[in-house]
Every structure is written in structure tokens, then in C-alpha cells.
Image (tube, rainbow, N blue to C red):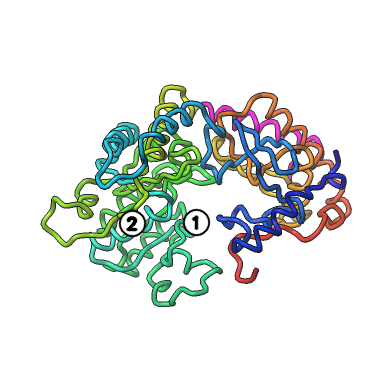
């Protein structure tokens, strides 16, 4: 099937109904139909393993499932069995469930660099709790975020720094400053310029590029010397880099860290973890001012905690982190070979750690291009590949990767035609995809 023949009439109708009822047509901006070619945004019916089916009946090999959350594949049997076991036993009580203890013990055994943990439902809850805790512990107001990492929270302290800052007072945004990833000198200059004002440094410990030797240890030393809290956002790196996250892989211990995404394999669970003396400020066994750390009605739903425990057990017992890396290396090699073979090796580029691959679509001048991304996504969809990224799940098979590489090769053949013409417009099928963070709809 060619992209010109590929149509999604039921998905298109469902998208229209979604926009009439749900602002943005989805519950996460990164899942919006503006992220896909015009009229080719599949609405999903169901998924199993590494595959999803849309309401039009098409099956896709899926990457980046659940915004990187579903790392074991959809409906993983060990996870669903653990969840089913709890569903008939009640999900939320007037007092803590014994699963809260068991889940905390399991998490801290998996991430031994942390001493205490508290669970919530999404990443923004726990990153904001980390910021609040750092401010309380230091008595300082400013927050320093890594400028090279795209997202930390839906809350004002971060969103106010993006183009989508409507509704956020400047007084809040002014309290957030930024530092560049990998540049210790620039970070030290920032800490010196705002001496005694910065409560925490918050960053993803690794991203599309590996941290340079000594960088994370250097941040640790800077945070200690300037009296601020070091926070690792491990939403993506947690489990994907190693069972214990990036901190377990690189051997640098933050004061606080936040986990989510892969932790629940699609079920809603996140975690704030860290040093006992900091975390206990949100507890009942200290003499200082109380910190309203996390208090969520649904933060300890039994089935979600059971899912998290099953995920961690599966990772450790089945070597999932290593499998994700092996699958990613296999996929990256195939994509690079296919792209080079079609003469687009300098334009369709795979980047990132093998367990967290993304792709860049570059124009004839080597610049990132939403127009060429639109062309590429459109061709992949026609080839049965749903890939906002190339982030793998452990459910992928050799056949899935072969299908993906075949779809990439077909897409790159069209990409080459567009490069030769100097204009991707005839192959876009409509308006280009758009960045999530933009001021106007």
C-alpha cells in the first residue's frame, strides 16, 4: 500500500468527535493529531505486545508506546495477572494497604541508592513534590532546570518557561532559571550568579547523548558546594537505562529522584525517592516544619502498585534492560543501513541510547524539518509502523524489526525524491506536523 492509498476514515471521524468533547482531542499533547500527518492520526482500538490496532482495523508495529511507558509490551501477562489479582480485593481504603509496604520494599530493593519512596499517579506530581521539598529544605526559592531536556512537569514552575505560558504569572516563571547539559562551567557560573538562591538542580541524568565522563559527578560536587539539592528526573531513564535507572548505571547518587513511565507498563504510577533526611520532612517523625510532600487520593491504588512490583520483578528476572538495548541496537543498525541504501543517510538519522532511540528528519540543508518528518511518518504509517520515535519495547520480534526496516526503506525512497526536488510538499498529504510547545494552536 502506498501512502496515497492509505486512509483512516473511522479514525478521522473519531478525531473530530474527540475534539468536540476533549480539549486538544487527546489527554496528552504529545498524542494530539497535530503530531501526525493530516487525516492520518490513528485512533487506537486495542493493543497486544508490540502491536496496536486502530478503529479502521489496521495493525501497526508500535514504538514509543504510551510515551515510553509501555516498555514490556501491551497486556504483558505478568503485569496483567498481578493487576487482576488485586481487582477483586478492593483498590483504595481508609488506611494504607499492605501493598504500599510491599511496593516500597520492592522499589527500594530495585533502586538501592534511595532510602525512602512515595508513590503518586503521574510524573508531574513527583517532580513538583521534589521541587517543593528542595525549597523547604534549603529555604531558597529559585529552581534551576536543564535547558536541554524537553519536559519536567505540567506545573507552573516549568510550563511557565515554555511558549505555552498563558495563565502563568511572571512572578512564578522568574523563579526558574536554566543551565545547559554537559557544561559544568556554565552551571557553576549560574550558581555563583544566584549564590544562595537556588534550591535545586533538576535534570534528566542522560538523554539523546551520553553524559561525558565526570559530568554527573561534577554536578554532584557543585550541588554540594553550593548547598542545593540534586534531583534526577528518571521518568525516561528509570528501568530503560538499568533496573536502578541512570543513577544505578553511572554510579552518581542524587539527593532526590523521580520515576514513572516504564514503572507501571502503562498503569498510572510514579515515585519520588531519595535521602531519608529530606524525604522525612514530608512525614511525621521529625521536629521541623511539615512539608506537604505528596497526598494523593489515588496514589496508592492497589492494582497500580501491583503492576509496578510485577514490572520490577520482570525486569530483574528476565534481564529486560539488556533486551531493550539489544533490540534497539538491532533496529538502529537496520534503519541506518536502509537509510544509507536509499541515499538519505545524512537526512534520516537515528540517535540516542539503544533503549531510547529517536530519529531526526533533516532537509536538504541538514536542518531539522517538520515537513520532512510529516512525509516520513506518512510513509511509515502506510507500511504498518506507528513510530513517533523508535523507542523499543521488549515485546518486539525479529519480524517486527524487519517490517520496520522495510517500511523505513520505502519511506526513504520517497524522501530521496523529495530531497532531489527540493520540496517535500507533494508527499506530505496536507499541513506539516507541529511542535508540541508553541504559542498558537
Secondary structure under the numbered disc 1 in the rendered image:
loop
Q: Residue 213 at x, y = what percent?
A: 43, 41
Q: Which residue is at a point 26% across and 43% down the rendered structure image?
A: 96
Whether residue 211 appears in this view of the structure is no
The residue carrying mark 2 is 129
Secondary structure under the numbered disc 2 in the rendered image:
helix
Residue 187 left/right relative to 433 = left
Provide the residue span drawn in magenta: 323-346
Q: Residue 209 at x, y = what percent?
A: 53, 45
Residue 440 is a magenta residue: no
Q: Nearer the viewer, residue 330 or 9?
A: 9
Q: Is residue 406 above or below residue 435?
A: above
Residue 330 is a magenta residue: yes
Q: Residue 232 at x, y = what percent?
A: 38, 49
| Mark 2 to mark 1 CA distance (whole Å) | 16 Å
The residue carrying mark 1 is 151
Q: Nearer the viewer, mark 2 or mark 1?
A: 2
Amino acid at each position: 500500500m502506498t501512502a496515497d492509498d492509505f486512509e483512516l476514515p473511522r479514525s478521522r471521524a473519531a478525531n473530530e468527535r474527540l475534539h468536540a468533547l476533549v480539549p486538544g482531542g487527546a489527554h496528552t499533547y504529545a498524542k494530539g493529531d497535530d503530531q501526525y500527518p493530516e487525516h492520518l492520526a490513528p485512533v487506537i482500538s486495542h493493543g497486544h505486545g508490540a502491536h496496536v490496532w486502530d478503529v479502521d482495523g489496521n495493525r501497526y508495529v508500535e514504538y514509543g508506546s504510551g510515551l515510553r511507558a509501555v516498555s514490556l509490551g501491551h497486556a504483558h501477562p505478568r503485569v496483567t495477572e498481578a493487576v487482576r489479582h488485586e481487582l477483586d480485593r478492593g483498590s483504595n481504603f481508609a488506611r494504607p494497604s499492605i501493598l504500599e509496604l510491599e511496593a516500597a520494599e520492592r522499589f527500594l530493593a530495585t533502586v538501592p541508592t534511595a532510602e525512602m519512596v512515595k508513590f503518586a499517579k503521574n510524573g508531574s506530581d513527583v517532580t513538583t513534590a521534589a521541587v517543593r521539598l528542595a525549597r523547604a529544605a534549603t529555604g531558597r526559592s529559585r529552581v534551576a532546570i536543564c535547558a536541554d531536556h524537553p519536559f519536567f512537569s505540567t506545573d507552573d514552575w516549568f510550563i511557565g518557561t515554555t511558549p505555552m505560558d498563558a495563565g502563568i504569572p511572571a512572578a512564578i516563571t522568574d523563579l526558574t532559571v536554566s543551565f545547559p547539559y554537559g557544561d559544568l562551567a556554565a552551571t557553576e557560573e549560574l550558581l555563583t550568579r544566584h549564590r544562595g538562591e537556588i534550591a535545586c538542580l533538576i535534570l534528566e541524568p542522560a538523554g539523546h547523548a551520553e553524559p561525558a565522563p565526570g559530568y554527573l559527578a561534577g554536578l554532584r560536587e557543585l550541588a554540594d558546594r553550593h548547598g542545593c539539592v540534586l534531583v534526577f528526573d528518571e521518568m525516561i531513564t528509570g528501568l530503560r537505562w538499568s533496573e536502578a535507572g541512570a543513577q544505578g548505571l553511572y554510579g552518581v547518587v542524587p539527593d532526590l529522584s523521580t520515576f514513572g513511565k516504564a514503572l507501571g507498563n502503562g498503569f498510572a504510577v510514579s515515585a519520588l525517592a531519595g535521602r531519608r533526611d529530606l524525604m522525612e520532612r514530608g512525614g511525621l517523625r521529625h521536629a521541623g516544619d511539615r512539608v506537604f510532600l505528596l497526598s494523593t487520593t489515588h496514589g496508592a491504588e492497589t492494582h497500580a502498585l501491583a503492576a509496578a512490583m510485577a514490572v520490577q520483578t520482570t525486569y530483574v528476572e528476565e534481564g529486560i534492560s539488556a533486551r531493550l538495548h539489544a533490540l534497539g541496537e538491532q533496529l538502529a543498525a537496520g534503519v541506518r543501513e536502509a537509510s544509507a541504501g536509499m541515499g538519505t543517510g545524512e537526512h534520516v538519522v537515528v540517535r540516542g541510547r539503544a533503549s531510547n532511540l529517536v530519529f531526526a528528519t533533516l532537509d536538504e540543508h541538514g536542518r531539522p524539518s517538520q515537513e520532512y518528518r510529516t512525509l516520513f511518518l506518512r510513509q511509515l504509517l502506510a507500511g504498518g509502523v506507528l513510530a513517533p520515535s523508535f523507542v523499543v519495547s521488549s515485546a518486539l520480534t525479529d519480524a517486527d524489526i524487519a517490517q520496520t526496516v522495510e517500511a523505513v526503506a520505502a519511506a526513504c525512497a520517497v524522501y530521496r525524491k523529495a530531497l532531489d526536488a527540493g520540496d517535500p510538499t507533494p508527499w506530505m498529504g496536507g499541513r506539516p506536523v507541529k511542535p508540541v510547545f508553541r504559542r498558537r494552536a
